[in-house]
Image (spheres, grey):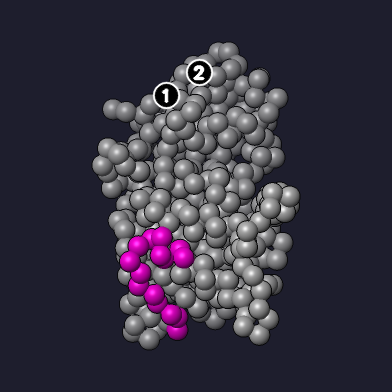
Amino acid sequence: MGEVKALTGNKCATMGAALCRPDLIAAYPITPQSSVVEGLADLVFSGELNSRMVQVESEHSAMSVVQGAAAAGGRVFTATSAQGLALMYEPYFRMSTLRLPMVMAIATREMTSPETIWSGQQDAMSVREAGWIQCFCETNQEILDMIIQGYMLAEDKRVLIPVNVCYDGFYSSHLVERVELPTQEEVDAFLPAYSLPAKLDPATPQALDPMTPGELLMKYRHNHLEAMQAALPVIDEVDAKFAAAFGRSYGGAIDTYRLDDADYALVTVGGMTGTARDVVDAMRESGVKVGVLKLRFTRPFPVEKVRAALANVKGFAVVDRSVSFGWNAGSMYSEVCAAMGETLAGKAHFSAIGGLGGADISMAHMENVVKTLTSLNEPGRADTLWLMD
């Protein structure tokens, strides 16, 4: 057991990455992520972390640098937000489709325009089809722990897919919470030494990413999708191993709160979940049986777990901090509805959108979601609810 400290979410990302002993870190600042790589630079240049720090001129370069090091068998790390994620999209997509494992933190932020630097989940949600595993964290402790778990998951031979650890910019990245910081010895005992099955080596020359005909590309995509689905039980395994080593379990791909006997469910992503829990407690006291389904992983999407968790509720609302432009709804709302399949027809459901551009999702907003949900008398989709004052 290490120290108990008061840490920001960005500091938790810094310490989580450092404890995993990365061989190389690429650093480029962008609000609200900047202090993650600044903190790692401090550790490297003070001699506290034995890692190569490469300061690059852009996020595109950051992902390209870690990609090269990962292809040579190194454990690597970087972090970004919003326009930085957009700028690195080409090598970001290539990182996953080359099946190079790594962990990258995303302090989530709205995308421009209109110009904004404030919190939202649009950046991470917009790249969810780029082949990465995506985890969304509720607390600062979860940020630290999931970076450690993320390496074990990404480097598992059944998976070999890079992992995004996402958390709410400014709300999580800059606010302070109580965090249990594990020791280096504890993390070393938990996280195995890294060995990439096929890596670039002058002693055994090989081609990396040659021009690939469609017939072979089909096989690569098929294998990637199979590995993504294979990651679902590995997520549970890693969570169980982490619980045994550190005493903290997050439930795997989803987490639930007071959902077993619930008539209604709030489906949440990230830091808003704490507000939802408080509202559930308050509504329960007034006799409304409501619970929470927290989506921890959005890729791979935990279809069977979502369907099972919502099997017995009369209705649900999915609260999003991002929008799906094609559906006049939140990003995760369409995903949850798709996961429900035929069972969706018997339930009332709607999309709730709030917290864009740094706007708060308050208890009053969540209470309004529950009241709207309980007022629906017929199964089927209701209009999208915008959480605006």
- Is 153 covered by the magenta stretch? no
Residue 94 image offset from top left, x and y in percent: 55, 58
The reply to whether callout 2 and callout 1 are in contact (CB within 8 Å) is yes
Task: Between residue 16 and residue 366, name the one nearer to us.
Answer: 16
Where is residue 342, by image quadrant? top right
Q: Position of residue 46 (x, y in %)?
A: 33, 84
Residue identifier under label 1: 385
Q: How many marks?
A: 2
Percent x, y for residue 265? 55, 31
Label 2 is placed on what type of residue? Ala
Magenta stretch containing residue 59, yes or no?
yes
- Residue 291 seen by the camera: no
- For disc 1, the neighbor class at 10 Å (few under 14, some 14 to 19, many from 20) is some
- SS under mark 2: loop
Q: Which residue is mark 2?
A: 382
Indicate the amino acid at tag 1: Leu
Which element is circle 1 on?
A: strand
Q: Quick one: which residue is furthest to the top in this view?
A: 378
Left/right of residue 172 with respect to residue 196 in the rendered view:
left
Q: From the top left corner, tell me how far across and down residue 153 is, in percent.
A: 62, 62
The vertical placement of 109 against 359, above or below, is below
Q: Which residues are magenta?
A: 50-64
